[in-house]
Amino acid sequence: MKAAMVRRYGPPSVVTIGDAPTPTPASDEVLVRVHCSTVSRTDCGERAPYPPGLGRLMYGLARPRRAIFGVDFAGVVEATGRGVTLFKAGDRVFGICPIRRSGAHAEFCCIPERGPIALLPASVAFERAVVCEGAYYADASLKRLDLKLGCKLLIYGASGAIGSSAVQLAKLYGANVTAVVGAQHLALAESLGADRVIDYLKEDFSTLDEKFDGAFDAVGKTTFYKCRKVLKPDGAFMAADMGPGGQNIYLLLWSLITGNRRVRLPVSPSGGAAGFVQSMRGWLERGEFRAVIDRAYPLDQIVEAYSYVETGQKTGIVVVNVGG
């Protein structure tokens, strides 16, 4: 099968297109012919870990433990293991590739049948189904904030894969959302359901009179110190990244030591991805969640896709058309 492979750490140019063995599904796995995947910040962080020491402990000391990346997938079941009962050949499916096995930047991938995989509604195109990774991260963040119906949430950077998902999910959960974005994304944030939209270049959100139950930095570019000015006394700050200078790690340790829970980082429950993908299936089918697609690249141009994602300017997701 054709695949994009990463055999050493480095810039986007280390990604090469070549032939790899087609995987054989185990008894409890399905073999998926991949139609679409994405290049995400997670893929970039796995290819060039930061910080290098901690990142290499996660992904491999000398080289990546796996050569084929790609977290999101959407495609068609090609074959099933002998013990599989939930899927059959020809089923349209989507979901999340487990991080410890080969991913979806290839023509085929294997997924446990009871893992993060679900039937794809007939009304949803493959390229509009590769949304689970950013949305799953956003969902874990919202749940760690313990938001209640009618609460007020500030989302900074509401235009990326995580931020645009957070706006939609927060509204599904009944929150009142203020989205902070650039001028070019004001209409997008409104269309996703944000109750109030702020252009961060024209208005300093930290000077608002309004107080929020939670603040979610979806891009790792603001700080707790700025957000706390608009947080209620028991409000919490959540970040999708380590923040400027890695400060969120130190702030999290401070929060844990003091027990004040003012700073939190998303921790997804073990095995929670499977349930989340099933929830996403329902949201997509009912039109309650939509993909925000910046652009799409064929698999042969995946190096260009990596380079674009690393500009930090993408809106929503960057799709990779693998095959089909």
Image (cartoon, helix red, strand yellow):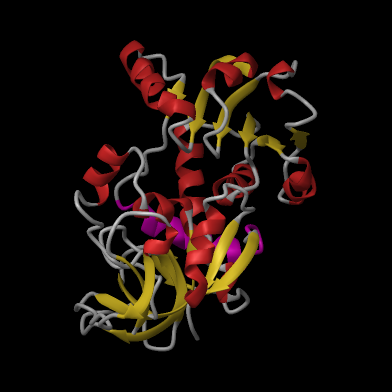
Between 156 and 145, the one lying in front of the other is: 156
Residue displayed at 43% across by 59% down: 12
Q: Is residue 288 above or below residue 4?
A: above
Magenta-highlighted residues: 271-289
Q: How many marks?
A: 0
- The verdict on residue 123 being magenta is no
Q: How far across and how far down the image is residue 73, in percent? A: 44, 69
| 251 with respect to 158 (left or right) | left
Between 287 and 221, the one lying in front of the other is: 221
Residue displayed at 64% across by 53% down: 315
Q: Does the image show residue 281?
A: no
Q: Is residue 180 above or below residue 23?
A: above
Q: How far across and how far down the image is residue 217, in percent? A: 55, 33
| 42 with respect to 270 (left or right) | right
Q: Main secondary structure of the magenta part?
A: helix
Q: How far across and how far down the image is residue 222, in percent? A: 57, 28
Q: Is residue 119 above or below residue 100?
A: below
Residue 7 image-quadrant placement: bottom left
Residue displayed at 62% across by 58% down: 289
Residue displayed at 38% across by 23% down: 252
Instruction: Name the image quarter holding the N terminus.
Output: bottom left
| 267 with respect to 149 (left or right) | left
Q: How far across and how far down the image is residue 11, in percent? A: 41, 55
Residue 259 image-quadrant placement: top left
